[in-house]
Image (cartoon, rainbow, N blue to C red):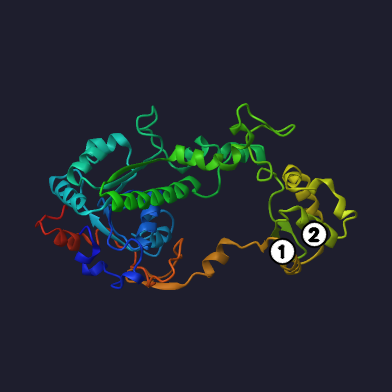
Amino acid sequence: MGATESNPETVRHHDASTRQPLDGITVLDLTRVVMGPFATQILADQGADVIMVEADGGDTNRVMGPGPHAELSGISLNLLRNKRSVAVDLKSAEGRAVLEELVRRCDVVVSTMRPHVLTRLGLDYASVRALREDVVYCQAQGFPVGSPRANEPAYDDIIQAACGVSDVVERVTGEPGLMPTIFADKVCGLVMAQAIVAALLQRARTGQGRHVEVPMNQAMGAFMLVEHGAGAISEPPVNMPGKPATGYARVLSPDRRPHPTSDGWVHLLPYRPEHYASLFAEAGVPNADDDPRYADLRATIANSDSLYRDVRRFTPTRTTAQWLDYCRRAGIPATEVASMQDLVEELPIVEHPHAGSYRLIPPLALFHGATMTTPSPAPLIGEHTAAVLDELGAHLTEAP
């Protein structure tokens, strides 16, 4: 089962030039909730045979919000697509035998359990490597292995507060807050997927496996500091007058938000000095060519607050369509404001054998030339247990 060709059910493409990039890679998914399942969804969308091991009650994401089936929330319909579900009790002898055989057959093992739980279950890297020496082993948890907080529970909210998100929200709103999306979970899921593929590439070159760790607070801290490290990255730190050394001023402006129009909202971004000169001249602002606030790119960034406020004063004079038309002609980035419902309504409708019709969220990346097929539907809990046990060929008994 290390290569999907041994399992006809999972063979999607026969012509190597049109196959998905990860066809032939088998992934053992021991993750929960969203972060890990999002990472393995990406791998599955790119052709990997992802086998997720679930307890009898199934994963948490199956009950996160409403859905058309008791085992399938709206979230899980897309998060679990292209995967196979095996229901086993990891604490039983039968479950352990199944798990160990799966480890031997899989190229990648992915877990979001805390280090002490992995050790207790015999799923730490050393134990897994003893079963398959060239395994790519990815573990993700809140804080780095070996750190004082390594075994603390950590969900998205905790990591957002720990990695600076709440701090930058406070600078904009006046009070610490969180992004209204599971920001850290999804960013770290992306990091996991990228790191796994990098380790697979190295294994293809060297024949050696790799232990990959994604500590959420470290990954998110690095992510946040890309721009918000700002002048504090210098030693000694440098800062703009009246502002702290950390934080990218333009992004932290409280006026960095969509602007009202005469019939709705538009978000336009006059990013470069010539954008501002053109936009202000179009709006009839006197001396638009001579404003020192956008004399150069550095000036536009430093004066973001007042410039955004000035733009906001005149956008209500036209409709959204009129502003979009002007911005396209002037080369100024702009868009109408889409609702979440707008995004949903753009999605194609497909059929699930147990849950009926649902909207299919597109993959994050498109590989041109690869044959695109309708994803296999999200499985019910343990739907593939018998098939996977049969593939293992060890006459293992399914755990109750």
Q: Can see residue 304?
A: yes
Residue at the (69%, 55%) spot, across then down: 258
Q: Quick one: 349 or 205, which is closer to the camera?
A: 205
Q: Quick one: 287 or 10, which is closer to the camera?
A: 287
Residue at the (75%, 47%) spot, across then down: 300
Q: Quick one: 299 or 137, which is closer to the camera?
A: 299
> Closer to the observer: label 1 or label 2?
1
Q: For the view shown, which residue lies furthest in the right direction?
A: 286
Q: For the view shown, which residue lies furthest in the left direction?
A: 395
Q: Is residue 269 left or right of residue 368?
A: right
Q: Residue 248 bears which disc, if any? A: none
Q: Is residue 372 left or right of residue 49?
A: right
Q: Earlier in the sequence, mark 1 or mark 2?
A: 2
Q: Are marks 1 and 2 in contact (CB under 8 Å)?
A: no
User: Identity of the amino acid at label 2?
Assistant: Leu
Image quarter of the N terminus: bottom left
Q: Residues within 10 Å of mark 1 (few under 14, many from 20)?
A: few
Residue at the (52%, 50%) spot, across then down: 181
Toward which corner of the image does residue 16 lie, by quadrant? bottom left
Residue receiving disc 2: 279
Q: Position of residue 347 (x, y in %)?
A: 49, 69
Residue receiving disc 1: 331
Q: CA distance from mark 1 to mark 2?
A: 10 Å
Q: Position of residue 353 (x, y in %)?
A: 32, 71
Q: Can see residue 34?
A: no
Q: For the view shown, which residue lies furthest in the front direction?
A: 205
- As drawn, 120 above or below 62: above
Q: Is disc 2 placed on a helix, strand or loop?
A: helix
